Amino acid sequence: MYLIVGLGNPEKEYANTRHNMGFDVINKISEKNKIEVNKTKYEGLYGKGEIEGEKVILLKPQTYMNLSGQAVKEYADFYKIPLENTIVIFDDIALEKGQIKVRKQGSGGSHKGMISVVETLGTENIPRIRVGIGSPENKKYMIEYVISKINKEEQELLKPGIEKAADAIETIIKEGFDKAMNKYNSK
């Protein structure tokens, strides 16, 4: 069984923002695999289904971003999902729009949601997919940049990253992390 977690902020004011790329990828996976994400438990919105013949739980933590680790831990513990089968998807300012990066482990970097997951689970050995959102010209506007609304033009630039991340999940489940890293990681 896999736990696939998309990081984002649950409030409506954060819908259609760069910081909710994790939620957007979960929505795309849900749509492609006909898995309804409409149940609530443990501070999360989730759905169960199958991808490539494997049981999966799609999860959108319903805490603020910097508390995301709480929901991830509760689901991983309750369903006894090993860390190597817990995949976290989140936005990344270090990657260009439309790019993704698949990694088996790493620090939380500057992403408060991933920092929470790493700290709560007590390890950096957490697989993840980073979805590029680019960065603002002036770094002092970083917070405003990640939580501001996306216009239609920019949505078209971000869409390939969302689609690649959803496809990468299928590749990971079917063929493993190494294949997914070779296929999707930007050079």
Image (cartoon, rainbow, N blue to C red):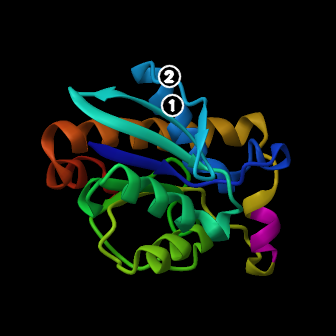
Q: Is residue 96 left or right of residue 33?
A: right
Q: Are marks 1 and 2 in contact (CB under 8 Å)?
A: yes
The type of residue carrying mark 2 is Glu
**Residue at image coords 42%, 31%:** 48
Local secondary structure at mark 1: helix
Q: Quadrant of the N terminus?
A: top left
**Residue at image coords 36%, 54%:** 87
The type of residue carrying mark 1 is Lys
Circle 1 residues within 10 Å: few <14, some 14–19, many ≥20: some
Residue 187 is drawn in which quadrant?
bottom left
Query: How far apart are labels 1 and 2 at the CA level?
Result: 5 Å
Residue 133 is drawn in which quadrant?
bottom right
The residue identified by callout 2 is 31
Residue lying farthest top? 34
Which span of residues is magenta-colored? 141-145
**Residue at image coords 77%, 76%:** 138
Local secondary structure at mark 2: helix
Residue lying farthest right? 13
- Looking at the image, which is closer to me, 5 or 82? 82
Q: Position of residue 177 (x, y in %)?
A: 20, 53
Q: What is the magenta segment's predominant secondary structure?
A: helix
Q: Position of residue 51 (x, y in %)?
A: 29, 29
Q: Position of residue 153 (x, y in %)?
A: 72, 37
Q: Is residue 26 magenta?
A: no
- Looking at the image, which is closer to me, 174 or 137? 174
Q: Is residue 10 left or right of residue 160?
A: right
* Image: 26 above or below 31: below
The residue identified by callout 1 is 28
Q: Is residue 176 left or right of residue 80?
A: left
- For the question of whether residue 180 can be seen, the reply is yes
Q: Is residue 142 magenta?
A: yes
